[in-house]
Image: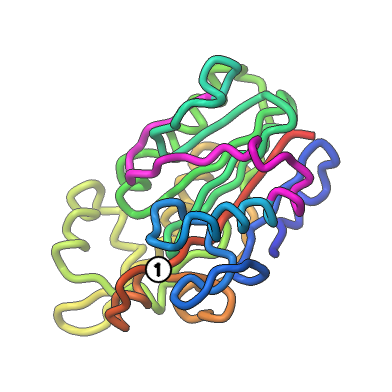
Amino acid sequence: MFYSKKLKKFKEINHCFFSRNGGVSKGLYRSLNCGKGSKDKKQNISKNLKIVSKKMKVNSNNIILMYQTHSNKVIQINKHNIKKQINSDSIITKIKGFALGVVTADCVPILLFDYKNKIVGCVHAGWKGALKGIIKNTISKIRSISPNNKIYACIGPCIGKKSYEVDLEFYKKFILNSKKNKRYFFDKSEHKKLFDLRKFVTDKLIEQKVKVDHVNYDTFTESRNFFSYRRSSIFKEKDYGRCISLIKLN
């Protein structure tokens, strides 16, 4: 369990970036796998979510998770859609007592709190969503509720720049978007680059005048604490677990 130093100061919210530890899943999914999209036993995922809900002091039925597709879609949770399937990569709400969650295995989990308007949010920011504008869209959605705000964000555990090797086609996608994106890449070899996803996402938040802090761990290298899609791919494992990050208004 990991916490933002800034978000921890606010009594109005609870939040946590959960590690992979403390759950009931076995094998590839050991132990706190919260990924409903994984091939883990459904009863294990359900038990893990109940463990998480107790830590968050919320009913397990009041955890709201997204069906994540690496999009730039943001949804505000209200009384009309609170029990429906949420197809998005970012959710925000003003409703108390519901924990908003994002599951990740190398992508960036972002937790948000607008202190002035008592709005919480969470974002799933992989490279696709970040490039498509998921962060700008999320902040715009918060500001559409009220332009007078003070937004804090914490970027959680994700793949580190030393672990994120990409090819030149990947690199070109970012450079075509903006030549300024060169600063997020470092030479690994003639045909490979290293990509700093955390820095890319951080700068997108700063551009939106959001105050940012970090829970800075590399999900790829820290196998004891985190699931990693890339690590599982390298080891040719059939599937992988997902860590969960949550925030709620008290």
In the displayed structure, would residue 216 be above or below residue 119?
below
Q: Position of residue 212 (x, y in %)?
A: 62, 50
Q: Nearer the viewer, residue 92 or 210?
A: 92
Q: Check disc 1 and give the amino acid type.
A: Tyr
Q: Nearer the viewer, residue 116 or 183?
A: 116
Highlighted range, magenta: 53-76
Q: Position of residue 55 (x, y in %)?
A: 76, 54
* Helix, strand or loop status at disc 1: loop
In the displayed structure, would residue 246 be above or below residue 75?
below
Q: Position of residue 83 (x, y in %)?
A: 54, 26
Q: Is residue 151 visible?
A: no
| Magenta stretch: includes residue 139 | no
Q: How many marks?
A: 1
Q: Quadrant of the C terminus?
A: top right
| Magenta stretch: includes residue 57 | yes
Q: Quadrant of the N terminus?
A: bottom right
Picture residue at 66% right of the left edge, 29% below the top: 119
Q: Is residue 232 left or right of residue 83?
A: left
Which residue position is annotated with label 1? 240
